[in-house]
Image (spheres, helix red, strand yellow):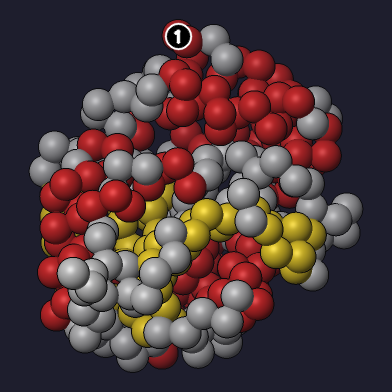
Amino acid sequence: MPSVELSSGTIEYQDTGGEGPVLVFGHGMPMSGTQWRKVVPLLDGYRCVLPTLPLGGHRLPMKPDADLSQRGVARLLGEFVERLGLDGVTLVLNDWGGGQFLVTEGRDARIARMVLVACEAFDNFPPGPAKAMAQVCRVPGGVRLLIRLMGVPAVRHMRSGYGGMSLRGIPDEVMDDWLAPAAGSRDIRRDLAKFATGAPDRRTLLAWSEGLRAFDRPVLVVWAKEDRLMPREHGPRLAALYPRGRLVEIAGSSTLVPEDQPERLAEVLTDFLVGTGAEPARRTP
């Protein structure tokens, strides 16, 4: 897997390559680019770049002094885009919504449009059950305990936790891959704890949200009708926040729309891209 050295440490990433418009995909905690494994193959003609951000599913620990707060990871994502020299980027987020703060951090010059798929927004950082997880992560040994509990099938599939993020269910082998780095490395657990406890207070989050109005490029908000973590009202509210935002709701899905409705998501994503000037590259016969 290719990697790039950034100010906070080394970031691994996947890159499908090609001459098409660039899509950069974010992911949730403690996930990786495999969150999009069902969607990327449906996006022929686009260059899909999937960094593994330091949210707990990364294999290479960050530097001990790395800022892994919400705004710190957003800045790291912006640095990643800059170091790879990517322009005209479509930023696609699901679950983790902190990538939006590229706007408030002034690091959005290379972002041509955004696609926000059932993600954290407004004061919902972290959402629902993850708030309790964040509190556990503040306790010494808390992250290790959480990772061990997530190895128990009855716990990982609870509808009040990760089991509620997908109506279809996250395959055990995928979840095992997400959890393995933190299970095997104290430094990865340190990074995960930093991120999990790195959200500011409600007033600050809402102030940052107001700053997102400055993003004047196209934004597609895709919301899941059966989502247990992201409030249903946040979809239309988020679409209204952005000057050029629009909303599409998808039935038959919880938070992880790429898991539950990959074909429908790829369809609405492609329609949005084509409609905003990002035509896929055509293969030469």
Q: Quadrant of the C terminus?
A: bottom left
Q: Quadrant of residue 278?
A: bottom left
What's the residue at 66%, 16% (across, down)?
Answer: 148
Residue at the extreme right of the image, as rendered: 64
- Image side of residue 32 versus residue 22, left or right: right
Residue shown at the point (29%, 50%) measured from the top left: 41
Corner quadrant of residue 249: bottom left
Total numbered badges shown on the rendered structure: 1
The answer to whether any part of residue 184 appears in the image is: yes
Instruction: Name the residue located 85 percent from the left edge and 56 percent from the top edge.
Output: 63
Q: On the picture, is 15 further left or further right than 137?
A: left
* Residue found at the very far front of the displayed protein: 285
Q: Where residue 29 sits: x, y (%)?
A: 54, 43
Choose between 179 and 42: the one closer to the eye.
42
Residue 12 at what x, y percent from top left? 64, 54
Pointer 1 residue = 154
Secondary structure beneath disc 1?
Answer: helix
Q: Nearer the viewer, residue 143 or 114?
A: 114
Query: In x, y percent, where is residue 244?
Result: 23, 84
Q: Identify which amino acid the numbered label 1 is placed on.
A: Ala
Q: Residues within 10 Å of mark 1 (few under 14, many from 20)?
A: few
The answer to whether 271 is drawn above or below residue 9 in the figure is below
Residue at x 46%, y 71% (from the top left corner): 100
User: Residue 141's spot in the image, x, y percent?
Assistant: 80, 26
Taking 5 as reference, is 182 above or below it? above
